[in-house]
Image (tube, rainbow, N blue to C red):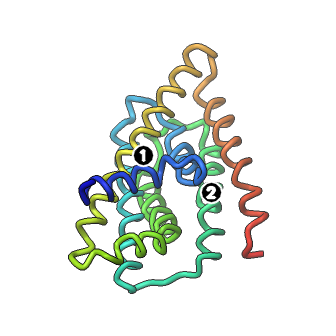
Amino acid sequence: MSEFQLYFQQGLYHVLDINAYDHILFIVALTVPYVFKDWKNVLLLVTLFTIGHSMSLILAVYDIISVKSSLVEFLIPVTIFITAVYNIFRANKSGKRDNVNFLAFTTLFFGIIHGLGFSSYFKMLVANNSGDKLVPLAEFALGIEVAQVIIVLIVLILSWAVQTFLRFSQRDWILVACSFVAGVVVPMIIHNRIW
């Protein structure tokens, strides 16, 4: 297996691992308010999340930042909960009316938090790489981006199907999907070892 394939697959599986579903939940909550015609906004947000994720990995790999894992493991479900609740309160508004700058900054920041949750493992993954660590990071980030786009497509198709065949309004779909996401992460927050 080539190095590119190794790091790309690690990025892909990092997101699509059903046992580590926090990343999936975040992308679902981020995507639910949008429809296919808003694909540019969704792609921008998902890419900013990948950039934030990659920034924290760079900072961790080069030992510029180190954060207690218990704090990060607490903050990750909090970011998912905040995103879901934000969408619940904004359910009556179309995704394109959102303040893109606010969402962009928030998504980038949340990406940094999520990246810190994977930084210890990624440091071990590239520890034996004596060369530049930025190339493996770029390959890993590409895997993350592809996996996130897959999730976005699944959510957009599901949104279309629910709104078309089950006659859910966009508002109701956002309320149901984001309430589900929030309901899944609340126990993660309550039972976190930080308490």
Residue at figure coordinates x 34%, y 83% from the top left: 62
Q: Nearer the viewer, residue 165 or 138?
A: 138
Q: Point out the residue furthest to the top here.
A: 165
The tag on residue 148 is 1
The x, y position of residue 86, in whole percent, is 61, 51
Cα gap from disc 2 to disc 1, whole angstroms? 19 Å
Residue position for label 2: 82
Who comes first in sequence, dot 2 or dot 1? 2
**Relative to 65, does residue 52 appear above or below in the rendering?**
above
Quadrant of the image occupied by residue 36: top left
Seen from the viewer's position, the closer of residues 154 and 125 is 125
- Amino acid on which disc 1 is placed: Gln
Q: Give whichever of 114, 171 is nearer the camera.
A: 114
Residue 83 — which label? none
Image point (57%, 46%), residue name? 18
Q: Is residue 8 left or right of residue 72?
A: left
Q: Is residue 166 above or below residue 124?
A: above
Give the secondary structure at mark 2: helix
Q: Residues within 10 Å of mark 1 (few under 14, many from 20)?
A: many
Q: Position of residue 2 (x, y in %)?
A: 24, 56
In the rendered view, would you say 187 is above or below 24? below
